[in-house]
Amino acid sequence: MPEHNLCQEFLSQISDYLDNNIDPLTCDELEKHLVDCPNCRVFVDTLKKTVYLYQQQEADINVPSEVRGRLFKVLNLDDLTR
């Protein structure tokens, strides 16, 4: 499978991977991919750091709906705003 397809497959499972909600065999395959793919590794590290920083916030964050909508659209999650 070409590297690009591996990256797409990995990114389609990133949420389950980060939530430890993925079968062990797939997890092993994804971790092997991370060793060989610096782009995906940077993406995962950045996403992990973002989640960590968000979870460390003590105050409730009130994001205006228009900002939230733009963010979700950029992240291709705009179907979650409906």
Image (cartoon, grey):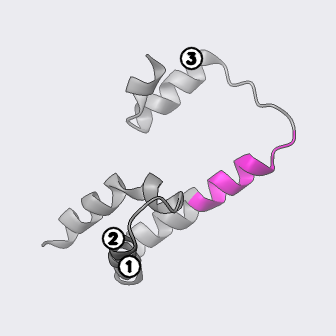
**Image quarter of the N terminus:** bottom left
Residue drawn at the location 68% of the way across and 25% of the way down:
63
Q: Which residue is at the front of the view, 18 or 33?
A: 18
Instruction: Residue at 36% x, 56% y: name it.
Output: 13
Rounded to the nearest whole Å, what is the CA distance between mark 1 and mark 3? 39 Å
2 and 21: which one is in front?
Answer: 21
Front residue of 15/43: it is: 15
Element marked by disc 3: helix
The residue where tag 2 is placed is: 26
Q: Amino acid at mark 3?
A: Glu
In the picture, measured across the screen, residue 7 lies left or right of residue 51, that is left
Q: Position of residue 5 (x, y in %)?
A: 19, 63
Q: Residues within 10 Å of mark 3 (few under 14, many from 20)?
A: few
The secondary structure type at the circle numbered 1 is: helix
What secondary structure do most residues of the magenta stretch adopt? helix
Q: Are marks 1 and 3 in contact (CB under 8 Å)?
A: no
> What residue span does the magenta drawing correspond to?
48-58
In space, the residues marked 2 and 3 are separated at their CA atoms by 37 Å
Residue 56 among magenta residues: yes
Q: Please identify, in this view, whether the residue under mark 2 or under mark 3 is nearer the observer.
A: 2
Give the mark nearest the N terminus, 1 or 3. Answer: 1
The crowding category of the residue bearing disc 1, from other C-alpha atoms within 10 Å (few below 14, some 14 to 19, many at least 20), is: few
Pointer 1 residue: 28
In the visual, does 66 lie left or right of 21? right
